[in-house]
Amino acid sequence: MLVIFLVILVIPLSNSLENVKTDQWEILFSSNVKTRDILFGTFVGKIPIYGLLSLILSSVIVAPFVYVYNVSILGQLLMYSIVIPFAITTIWISNVISTALQAKIGQSPRGDDIAKALSWAMIPIIMIPAMGSMYWTTQMIALMGLEFSMILPSTWVADVLTWISVNSSNLPPSSIFNIQSYWFQISPYISLILVGVFAAAVFFIGFRSADSLFSLGSGLGSKKVITVGPENFAIRGVRRIFGSTFGVIMATSLKDYTRKLQNVAKISYAIFLSMMIPLLLAFGPLANVVDDPIFVPVMTCLSIGMMLGIFGGVVFGGIGLLDSQDQLWILKGAPSGVPKFILARVLSYMMLGSIIAIIPAVFAGVLLQLAVSTIAMIVLYVYSIVVAGIFIGVGITAFNPSYEDSSSSAFAVNTVATIFITMIALMAGLIPGVLMAITQGVLGPALTIAAIPAPIVGLVILFAGTIKLNISEVV
Amino acid sequence: MATPIGSDISAMDSEKGNSSQVSQENTFGYIEDVPYVWQEVNGYCMSAALSMVLQGMGLDLDLYDLAAAMGTGFSALYLGIDETRMFYPGILIRQPEYFDFFSEIYEVDLAVYLDSSTDFGRGADYAYERANLDYIDFSNSTMDPFEVLRESIDAGIPLAVSVDPYYLPPDDYDVIRQYLAPLTENGIGHAITIVGYNHTSHEVYIQDPGVGVLDNRGYPDDGRWNYTMSYFDFNRAWESSGYYTLRLTPGSGPVEDFEEKLGDFICNRLRGDRTMYFTGYENFYFISAGKDAYSGMALDLTVDCIADYARYFTEVNKPDAILRMGHMFETFLTTQYYSYKGALESLPNILPEVNLQDFLDAANDALPHFEVLSHNASINSGVQVEFRDSLIFSTFEDIALEFDSSGNLEGSIALYQEELDEIGEHLFAIADSWDDAANALEEALNLPDDTTPLETSFPVIVGGSGILVLAVAIFLVKRRK
């Protein structure tokens, strides 16, 4: 229930931070519209789409109860009558938080970038404790000696739902007695009251705080004077390695990419998701089922590779490649401008890609207690897939530049094409690789075979994309 | 100062390995004068076999002393789901955990052996794995079961082993050979005590606690409980039962906090502490333990609930299913009654320093209700159900007959709702008695109060919510300023 609660909370939050709309609010404020009206309006506007999401998630919650306890129709209706208001309350919380965040950061010079970064970072920030609660609740209770989840509204709702479902089920009375006596930490009546009080309090506090939380204006953070400091050793190293001319392009490319908070957030997000896989392999439901010296590293490679291959394309391709048509025009004006620029971009991305390949792969290896040689093989495999993703992502964006507009159709098409081609290229290598691992029980050759097709496909697309970009006319 | 019975270490030392009783040659070993313990009721074979082993070691613990010291007399379980409505007496619930607890508080070394490569051994292996208890698996060891047997006898200690009664020689087991088959993975084995061996004639000497129990033959006065089997025949019986063996060796005697540990254990068994009964399965809502076993069974004696149970059977089999439900309820309640009664009588000897008067007063309240719900004929029934005139059996028999003639399931059950309610009242009374007894024992031993989850969590919820509200309020006030 906590996970579903957080999903309903985080998705609208993340989505609304993708597009900061404080400019619109200023227009509305000038027409004597109250802040609480804006708050309520944005909330009502979100209800149809997120209400639909809540309805789908509600059925995910209700269905297992119905299946296990054979809950009557009346019972199901009662359950929905609890879940849906709670989901709406959650959307309201999400709305209040996102509006407050937008108001805070929207007016700062880097507001849009920070908001986009936050929209990416929000998911791991909220989902890490949620995932943790799924696997380590028992240990936490043992450690604290208390059922800490009882202070969470999601637990109250879960208790009320359980209570309704068992009392409208065909379970034997002894089972209902056991559930009521031993499953609930507090009386379901108290839980019901707590849910009601929570919903009322959330709406009340949201409205009351509207004026104070949503005062627009640049905060202290936005008034910071940007200063230029000395370059770090990595940038200096890049300049030294690639010489004076190409080194400048490389250093600019690296700075250009890492300066944007949203890019850093995307890389962090990719690393977070990739680290979740070994965590699930080590402590999840399959942890005690499979303990095979070939299966475990192959599964690790497969899952991390797929995750990072797609991320390599999406994170490094797309809006990260070219800022504007003006930039392209400048590049085309320089001798071999476009190929050099693409090469610099790809090389700098490959340097950054090494981080997102090494951290999860080494983390997985240590967590799953794999041999050093196996960890090295996983790192190499994952890196080859990340590089393939970079080639494909940059190649496709070069074919069809989307510049900085993440809401353009070109961006959407590029993203889908990148994911699709990366997946196909990955599968082309994985199938023979996994077959070899299963039939011959060898890891090194299997990973080598699995690693070859994707970078080759990527290189072809990259070359084609570069040629297309070089010969294309700037509108 | 009075000491608990069975705690006399000096007696144990003098008995153990007495050279006058055990031949020091490796070809022959026999432990004389091991007191014979008859198991009396089905299910108590291993307890009786262990009692013989313990008495052979010098620990004077009879069958009912073990029912008290292991907690079996104070345990019960009810399982109510789908086509299962079954009450289990304490002795039939996860026996390995009782043995482990007993060996822990009496500080005797208990070594468990089994062979997981056999069908029955696989089941035993699962039971020990599930309970997270140590054991030695013959299939992963170079040890030979007969070597363990000879070593124990040579050390002067009888050996408790599980066997398949199908292969045992006494004619008491003819009924098993006639109607049943050798043991399977989830079958129920029998336990006997090995008191000697002859490696020259390849024979083992056995004391069998189970003869006379089946077919209501009674205590085996004729001495047929003491018999000899060839290695070959005995191996068949032992192997079929997974070579499951309990080997005891003397330790340092009862633990220092013996009274508290045993008292706490009994309190938790009576109350039905779900973690203690079935760790890892606490959320299995269809299992009720301790006092809840009785109240759970009482709650399920409704028209809807019995009808739901009967619907899992075909129309033809419904009467028999209803009859068997009543029969099994009564059989296992009777089994529990005797062990509970015996354990209550023994406990003052086990805990002589504790004033158990209040506990016994509360616990004895359950006995008249057990008396009404029990019948000797139930536990003496063999393969065939023995018809008798008793509250539980007669009620279910009447429901079955009524349904057989009318074909109306709910109507047939509803006709006997009054009798079902009467059974329920007795069961609720037993549940109350067990709860009161646990409270009284807790008080007598000054054990820490077992607080309920509600009591521990409520301050957390109120406190946590209060802090949250306060934080929001402070934040809002600050913003205003």
Image (cartoon, rainbow, N blue to C red):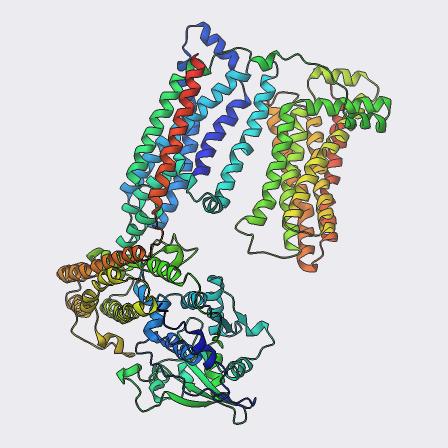
Q: Is residue A449 visible?
A: no
Is A308 placed left or right of B246 in the picture?
right
Residue B384 x, y percent position in the rendering: 27, 78
> Viewer-proximal residue, A101 or B48?
B48
- Percent coordinates x, y for residue B54 in the rendering: 42, 77
Furthest toward the bottom, the residue is B201
Quadrant (top left, top right, bottom left, bottom right) of the N terminus of chain A: top left
Tell me where residue B51 sits by quadrant: bottom left
Name of the residue lying farthest toward the right:
A243
Q: Say left or right for B456 vs A405.
A: left
User: How far across and down, in percent of the image, does residue B119 sit?
Assistant: 48, 73
Q: Toward the viewer: B279 or B103?
A: B103
Q: Is residue B360 above or below residue B155?
A: above
Q: Residue at x 41, y 42 (%)?
A: A147
Residue B359 visible in the snapshot: yes
Whether residue B404 sits left or right of residue B341 in the image: it is left
The residue positioned farthest toward the front in the image shown: B1
The structure residue drawn at horizontal position 43% and vertical position 34%, both measured from the top left corner, is: A5
Q: How many marks?
A: 0
Which quadrant would the C terminus of chain A be assigned to in this image? top right
Q: Position of residue A192 (x, y in %)?
A: 31, 35
Q: Is residue B125 above or below residue B438?
A: below
